[in-house]
Amino acid sequence: MSEEELKKYVFSETVKIISALTAKNGGYGTAMSLFDRVYEDLMELAVEKGLKEK
C-alpha cells in the first residue's frame, strides 16, 4: 500500500467513524468498532512493513 493509498484509506474510514458518531442508533459503539478495525488493519500493515513486531 502506497502512502497515498494509506491516506485515502484512513480518510475514508475516519469519515465512516464520524458518520457513526452522529447516527441515532449505535453511535459511539459503532464508531469504536470501526476504529478498532482500522487500528487492527494499520497494525497489520506496520508488522508487514517491519515497523512493529508481532
Image (tube, rainbow, N blue to C red):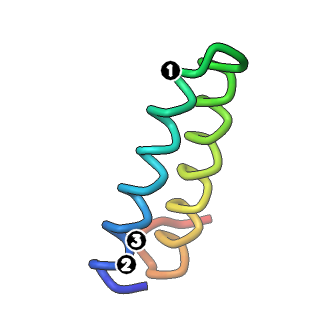
Distance (Cα) linking label 2 and label 1:
26 Å
Residue sitting at 43 percent across and 65 percent down? Answer: 9
> Mark 3 belongs to which amino acid?
Leu
Q: Which residue position holds label 3?
A: 51
User: Residue 29: x percent and y percent?
Assistant: 68, 21
The N terminus, quarter of image? bottom left
> Mark 1 belongs to which amino acid?
Thr
The quadrant holding residue 41 is: bottom right
The residue carrying pointer 2 sits among few (fewer than 14), some (14 to 19) or many (20 or more) residues within 10 Å by Cα, namely few
The answer to whether the residues at label 3 and label 1 have Cβ atoms under 8 Å apart is no
Numbered disc 1: secondary structure: helix
Q: Which residue position holds label 1?
A: 22
Q: Earlier in the sequence, mark 3 or mark 1?
A: 1
Return the residue nearer the eye: 36 or 23.
23
Outermost residue, bottom direction?
2
The label on residue 5 is 2
Q: Is residue 45 left or right of residue 14?
A: right
User: Residue 37: x percent and y percent?
Assistant: 64, 49
Q: Nearer the viewer, mark 3 or mark 1?
A: 1
Q: Earlier in the sequence, mark 2 or mark 1?
A: 2
Numbered disc 3: secondary structure: loop
User: Residue 31: x percent and y percent?
Assistant: 58, 30
Residue sitting at 56 percent across and 40 percent down? Answer: 35
Residue sitting at 53 percent across and 60 percent down? Answer: 43
The quadrant holding residue 53 is: bottom right
